[in-house]
Amino acid sequence: MLVSSEVIKESGIQFGTSGARGLVEQFSIDACAAFTHAFVTSIQFHFKFKQVAIAIDNRPSSPVMAQSCAKAIEQLGLEVVYYGVVPTPALAYVSMQDSIPCIMVTGSHIPFDRNGLKFYRPDGEISKMDEQAILNSSAEFEAFTELTPLTANNKAASQYIERYTSLFDSQMLLGKRIGIYEHSSAGRDLYSAMFEALGAEVVSLERSDEFIPIDTEAVSDKDKQKAKAWSKEYNLDFIFSTDGDGDRPLVADENGDWLRGDILGLLCANAMNIDALVVPVSCNTAIENCDCFSHVTRTKIGSPYVIAEFDCLADNYQSVAGFEANGGFLLGSDALVNRKKIKALPTRDAVLPALMLLALAKEKPIYEFVNALPQRYTHSDRIQNFATEKSLAILNKAQKDASQFLIQLKYDETKVDSIDTTDGLRINLDSGDIIHFRPSGNAPELRCYAESSTVDYAIYLVNHALENIQQISC
């Protein structure tokens, strides 16, 4: 017999900001089974269920991982409901409606050689406390080697489409030309049907048979150029895309300019008349400066931290939501759109903010809504293959003397006003600019976020910081 906690520890897989992540080779059959047994047994004391749902993204390693999880579920005497390749929020939504737990096999945006598992209880995404219960589980199981192919059910896909198309008039997007940058997104076979059902003319863009790790928080220069070219070539009013598992949006306006995820979230929340917001510390300060919301709470980066705050606000505010700098929108309470009820979905979702922005665009161009916001601009980028241990060592030292750290980064024309260590090291400068460093929770990467009064200076702050931090010794 194998013990879950022992197998998980030996695998080297750990939880990041969103799910368990690791190299593909670490997600062996035993490791996937161990996580599944640990997850299911850890929640059986709190919920009654006879089924567990599974879905996957388009990574080549995902089907075998799903089969491994499915076999483990069957070992527990439970039925597997397999939804095939669908966005993470589609799986989470249908599972919550059916009051059953689910497992999403996805590495989201992380590099091709990695993958991951996301876990949802019948009432939604697991908490950090749930993660520890999984890691420490003493659940025992028998090893197995034979796997069985899974047959997909289309219920999750159809309910996800219905969730959104039911909110709007079928002619809402009539006359709009929408480009869908499909790449290898888990939702690429759903989005065309969704937008067409609302009257749009859809143009398919760059579908890929190979997995492409799109990061909505660090859009490449190549993708920026693509969007502008597509917008002109196809006369597009809007471009829609997502990351690998379809929970983070990437949208471009009429000019082919990609919107920052937190600006998209702000516009969506305001359009929905949300009372209270929960956002990570890395989000744009225009959220507070726009005076659109009764309350704003800032948290560590990661959807579990955002979700954990929803209960704290539910008793005092009629509607609660959250979003992240990567664009994922979390609906923390039921809400009304066009006088129609939309049920809470407290996990990252890419579709709702895109549709709310398109609804706004019936009044005037998208760029005009963006320009009407307080003019604070953010930018972010990352250094890949930068050891987490090195990142932590540099930032721990920098916290003790942020002024010296600025000198090492060769910022000679500004001084430290204050620092924020909610998540990583966020340095508020006396110029009003912000520089924020944080090791990724999902991969060996160092991320840098910046905010300034101009987009060019925000880009400069990030590029300059990432160039010079690599020269700092631990």
Image (cartoon, rainbow, N blue to C red):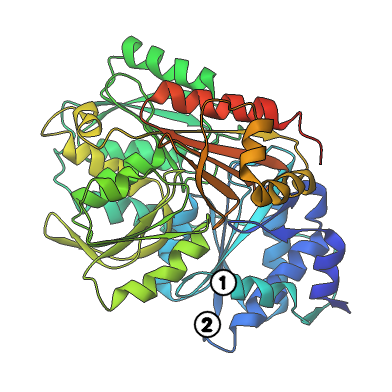
The quarter of the picture where residue 37 lies is: bottom right
Q: Residue at x 38, y 15 (%)?
A: 228
- Residue 436 x, y percent position in the rendering: 55, 42
> What's the mark number on residue 49?
2
- Please tell me whether mark 2 sits on a helix, a strand or a loop: loop
In this rendering, position of residue 39 left or right of residue 433? right
Q: Is residue 120 above or below residue 378?
A: below
> What's the mark number on residue 311?
none
- Residue 420 x, y percent position in the rendering: 52, 53
- Residue 163 x, y percent position in the rendering: 29, 56
Q: Residue at x 24, y 66 (%)?
A: 319
The residue nearer to you, when weighing 329 against 245, is 329
Crowd band around label 1 with a 10 angstrom C-alpha radius: few (<14), some (14–19), many (20+)? many
- Farthest bottom residue in view: 45
Q: How many marks?
A: 2
The residue nearer to you, when weighing 25 against 100, is 25
- Residue 81 x, y percent position in the rendering: 55, 66
Q: Is residue 254 above or below residue 59?
A: above
| Residue 74 visible, this orientation | no
Reading the image, the residue beneath label 1 is 52
In this rendering, position of residue 315 left or right of residue 122? left
The residue nearer to you, when weighing 340 against 192, is 340
- Which amino acid does the dot numbered 1 rest on? Val
Residue contact at pointers 1 and 2, CB within 8 angstroms: yes
- Please tell me whether mark 1 sits on a helix, a strand or a loop: strand
The quarter of the picture where residue 298 lies is: bottom left
Q: Is residue 406 above or below residue 305?
A: above
